[in-house]
């Protein structure tokens, strides 16, 4: 396909805005120009125009440049239009192709972590899950991931019920005490993801990795699951690595800076 014509000067000038967006704070002209790959004189001409548009401001005392109020308005407007589920759904099929296993998406619903999208691999094993299912907090990777980042009061009731059930059943593959839950969720936060093997369903491995928004809230869980005989259950393995790349990109698209 023939590349459409554009305005090169706009693309060149955007490099300055991109540098400011990635910087930890305001920058001197020489540092800003160097990072954008242009001379200070050339950068200054662009910055004059950007100041008129309020995309950039210059501190009179330090002479440093930073993003201006118009840039903030554009950023906030873009974030308000973003839909985490929509963004993830558009990329779920590609992830299925990469890992060869079923991918699902979950959000926090009225009753807990709820599956809202299902992208099945042609080689998927049959699992007794469907759209709208609410996942348990302790025996599913999805539940563990959401529980690690949810406010304590939001999960207190569910945790109490699930702990009591686990104790009655004498389970050894999931925590049965609050201390055990705390240790489990600490590990989830350290790894920034959860994994279960034969815990929710026999012979099934599942990963769930979080997607965060600009306020560092977990807004979405990306899930992959498959048969333990063919599913790479290693952290950093053939399944988790592409998932990690996707969730990091989605979080970045939603404005997460962590």
Image (cartoon, rainbow, N blue to C red):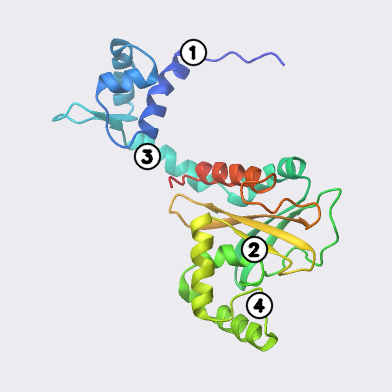
Q: Residue furthest left?
A: 61
Identify residue for label 3.
72
Q: CA distance from mark 4 to mark 1?
A: 62 Å
* Label 2: few (<14), some (14–19) or many (≥20) C-alpha neighbours in 10 Å: many
Which residue is found at the position 56% from the left and 41% from the top?
249
Q: Is residue 168 above or below residue 72?
A: below
Foreground disc of the pair 2, 3: 2
Residue 222 appears in the picture as rendered:
yes
Q: Marks 1 and 3, how far apart in space?
A: 24 Å
Horizontal and vertical percent position of residue 154:
51, 74
Q: CA distance from mark 1 to mark 2?
A: 47 Å
- Viewed as shown, does residue 28 lie left or right of 149? left
Mark 4, Cα crowd under 10 Å, few <14 / some 14-19 / many 20+, is: few
Q: Position of residue 126 (x, y in %)?
A: 86, 61
Q: Earlier in the sequence, mark 2 or mark 3?
A: 3
Q: Nearer the viewer, mark 4 or mark 1?
A: 4
For the residues labelled 4 and 2, the Cα–Cα distance comes to: 16 Å
Pair 4/2: label in front: 4
- Residue under circle 1? 8
Question: Looking at the image, do the residues carrying marks 4 and 3 touch, with CB atoms under 8 Å apart?
Answer: no
Is 65 or 159 nearer to us in this picture? 159
Label 2 sits on residue:
141
Residue 76: image location, x then y, percent: 43, 44
Quarter of the image for the N terminus: give it: top right
Query: Can residue 149 be seen here?
Result: no
Discs 1, 2 touching: Cβ within 8 Å: no
Question: In the image, which is nearer the foreground, mark 1 or mark 2?
Answer: 2
Among the two numbered marks 4 and 2 on one chain, the one whose residue lies closer to the N terminus:
2
Q: Which residue is mark 4?
A: 172
* Alpha carbon distance from label 4 to label 3: 51 Å
* Residue 172 placement (x, y as % from top left): 66, 77
């Amino acid at each position: 396909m023939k590349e459409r014509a554009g305005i090169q000067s706009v693309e060149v000038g955007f490099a300055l805005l991109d540098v400011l967006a990635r910087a930890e704070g305001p920058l001197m002209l020489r540092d800003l120009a160097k990072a954008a790959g242009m001379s200070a004189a050339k950068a200054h001409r662009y910055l004059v125009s950007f100041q008129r548009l309020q995309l950039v401001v210059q501190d009179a005392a330090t002479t440093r440049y930073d993003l201006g109020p118009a840039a903030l308005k554009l950023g906030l407007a873009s974030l308000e239009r973003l839909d985490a589920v929509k963004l993830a759904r558009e990329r779920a099929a590609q992830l299925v192709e990469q890992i060869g296993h079923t991918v699902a998406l979950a959000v926090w619903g009225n009753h807990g972590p709820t599956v809202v999208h299902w992208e099945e691999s042609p080689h998927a094993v049959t699992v007794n899950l469907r759209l709208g299912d609410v996942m348990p907090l302790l025996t599913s990777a999805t539940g563990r991931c959401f529980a690690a980042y949810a406010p304590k009061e939001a999960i207190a009731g569910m945790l109490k019920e699930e702990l009591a059930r686990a104790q009655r059943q004498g389970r050894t593959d999931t925590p049965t005490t609050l201390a055990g839950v705390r240790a489990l969720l600490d590990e989830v936060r350290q790894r920034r993801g959860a994994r279960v093997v034969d815990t929710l369903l026999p012979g099934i491995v599942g990963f769930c990795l979080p997607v965060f928004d600009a306020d560092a809230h977990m807004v979405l869980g990306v899930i992959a699951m498959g048969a333990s005989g063919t599913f790479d259950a290693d952290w950093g393995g053939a399944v988790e690595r592409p998932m990690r790349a996707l969730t990091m990109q989605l979080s970045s698209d939603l404005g997460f800076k962590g």
